[in-house]
Image (tube, helix red, strand yellow):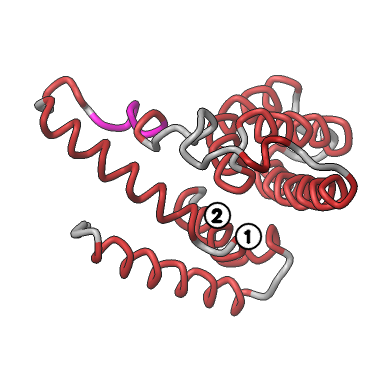
Amino acid sequence: MATPAEISDFLKSVENRAFKRSLYHVRNEESALDIVQDSMMKLVEHYSHKPAGELPLLFQKILSNSTIDWFRRQKTHKAHFSNLDDFEDEQGENDPEALSHLLAADAPQAQESSENQAHRNQTLRQIEQELELLPPRQREAFLLRYWEEMDLAETAAVMGCSQGSVKTHCFRAVAALSKALKIRGITL
């Protein structure tokens, strides 16, 4: 059984990444925050009796299910109501933040020139834009495997599909990203 401190530490460690992952899916900061908070609450309410080692996979599954539930609610809502946000320009205030905020702690920017920082930030924004264009299942598989660094079995469990499907989604996502970034002149 995980201690309250272990649960708290775990939730603190996944908070930012879970938010960014949800933001990629729903493209609305408030909704993404709600999804993450609901997922955290469900984990604590229903799975606090589980060992600490099982929390990451459980949380990712809960987060995926909460995101799917959000889309279902939106579909129902849109069937009955017209929302002014539906007419908002894609260049509006709700554009997701660049990946650079999340990766800033990982890179020693103090030694990097401002020109290199600007180029890196621009590249990260372009990668982020291409990630948003991926089909939802490909984006989810890609983010779980390469961003969350889950293995194949864990990713399949979270997505509720076979390992072969995960491989297919990841392959297609990488191919689409590579092609799109190559067109933009980005080589990694």
> In the picture shown, does residue 108 fall above or below 126?
above
Quadrant position of residue 10: top right
Quadrant position of residue 8: top right
Left-right relation of 102 to 63 = left
Segment colored magenta? 102-107
Give coordinates of residue 114: x percent, y percent. Answer: 13, 25
The structure residue drawn at horizontal position 18% and vertical position 31%, both measured from the top left corner, is 117
Q: Amino acid at mark 1?
A: Glu
Judging by the rendered image, the residue that carries numbered circle 2 is 144
Of the numbered discs 2 and 1, the one sitting upstream in the chain is 2
The structure residue drawn at horizontal position 18% and vertical position 59%, both measured from the top left corner, is 185
> In the picture shown, does residue 62 fall above or below 185?
above
Q: Which numbered mark, 2 or 1, is in the foreground of this view?
A: 2
Give coordinates of residue 88: x percent, y percent. Answer: 59, 38
The structure residue drawn at horizontal position 34% and vertical position 26%, both measured from the top left corner, is 105
Are the residues flagged by discs 2 and 1 in contact, CB closer than 8 Å? yes
The structure residue drawn at horizontal position 79% and vertical position 46%, both measured from the top left corner, is 74
The residues bearing labels 2 and 1 have C-alpha atoms spaced at a distance of: 9 Å
Q: Which mark is residue 154?
A: 1
